[in-house]
Amino acid sequence: MNYREYSCGMEPLADNSSLTTEERNENSLHLDTMTTREILTLINAEDHKVAPAVAAAIPQITEAVDLITSRLKAGGRLFYVGAGTSGRLGILDVAEVKPTFGVGLDTVEAIIAGGAKAITESVEEAEDDFHQGGEELKLRGIRENDAVVGIAASGSTPFVLGALVTAREAGAATIGIACNHNSRLRDYSDVTIEVIVGPEVLTGSTRMKAGTAQKMVLNMISTATMVKLGHVYENLMAGMQITNTKLLQRAIRIVSAAAGISADDAAALLDASGNDIKTAVVMGKLQVDAAAAQQLLAKADGYIRKAIALGLNARD
């Protein structure tokens, strides 16, 4: 059954019996007889397989980041869609985007099958609702400038597949993240990221290696996208929101390091900038006031490096 058949109203049935993520791991067949140390050593050994599997998918992750970046630059939004562990990992990534990069829910949002209740409780039946995934995106006004990342370890979760069908119909970019070869997500995604971590230590428990792989990929996608969008200067969190004392101290260190000035001077610049790190960095680098720095940043579309170059060129 292909995408066209699904889009005509036929719901997919998830037969996961042949999936790698559902196979038994030969290394853990005697898990229930092992000592605590043996169990932990085995889990750790299996976890070592995750990073190389993610590395093998970097070409596809690169495509995904570039596609998402292009949509966000055009004023679009990024949606993560998942169920169970996959959905919770999407929510976790989105929850960290605003404090880290200053990008809010109006730009990046996560949708989980079963709604808010599914964040802390299992709502297993929700993932089987093919049409509801699409309905959730329609409620958010999905449009062609948007990008949708469907996260499903199996690669066959109906809620996720339905969301991707709706995204495609709206002209949005679609990306799939799975942990099985030739997953169904391939029929629904412009880019499919398949990270093959092998059978779990606990058979079918994809919160383990598969979950770790998905978290790593989401870290890569959100971080690289935000770097490309100008929310990072050098390797510093220039878009970070200052919401408590710890983050204020971090912001002072960021401005001090970026502008090559003392902590006291950095604190003064942050105060003068209204606690905007980007503005404070440009002020420190160019020795200009907040208004001039903000004007340069506006011309540079928020990219600190470009704003500094514009300021230096204006002096020549």
Image (cartoon, helix red, strand yellow):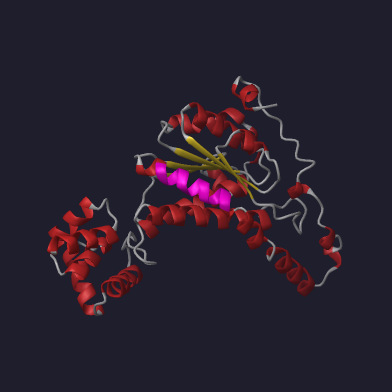
Q: Is residue 66 magenta?
A: yes
Determine the residue positioned at 79% across, 42% down.
18
Q: Residue at x 61, y 49 (%)?
A: 85
Q: How many numbered badges does the structure rendering display?
A: 0
Q: Is residue 204 magenta?
A: no
Taking depth in this image into account, of 198 and 252 the one nearest to the observer is: 198
SS assignment for the magenta stretch, majority: helix
Is 42 above or below relative to 195? below
Give the residue at the far top of this rendering.
8
Q: Looking at the rendering, in which quadrant would you find the N terminus?
A: top right
> Which quarter of the rendering shows the C terminus?
bottom left
Give the residues drawn in magenta, as a range.
59-70
Tell me where residue 128 sits by quadrant. top right
Relative to residue 287, is residue 229 drawn left or right?
right
Query: Position of 44 compared to 238: left or right?
Result: right
Q: Quadrant of residue 83?
A: top right
Name the residue nearer the viewer: 170 or 274: 170
How far across and down, in percent of the image, does residue 216 sit?
57, 58
Q: Position of residue 292 (x, y in %)?
A: 14, 59
Where residue 256 sits: x, y (%)? 28, 75
Q: Identify the residue at horizontal 51%, vertical 57% (top origin).
A: 219
Q: Is residue 109 visible?
A: no
Most foreground residue, 14 or 312: 312
Residue 70 or 99: which is nearer the viewer?
70
Q: Quadrant of residue 144?
A: top left
Q: Is residue 296 above or below residue 280?
A: above
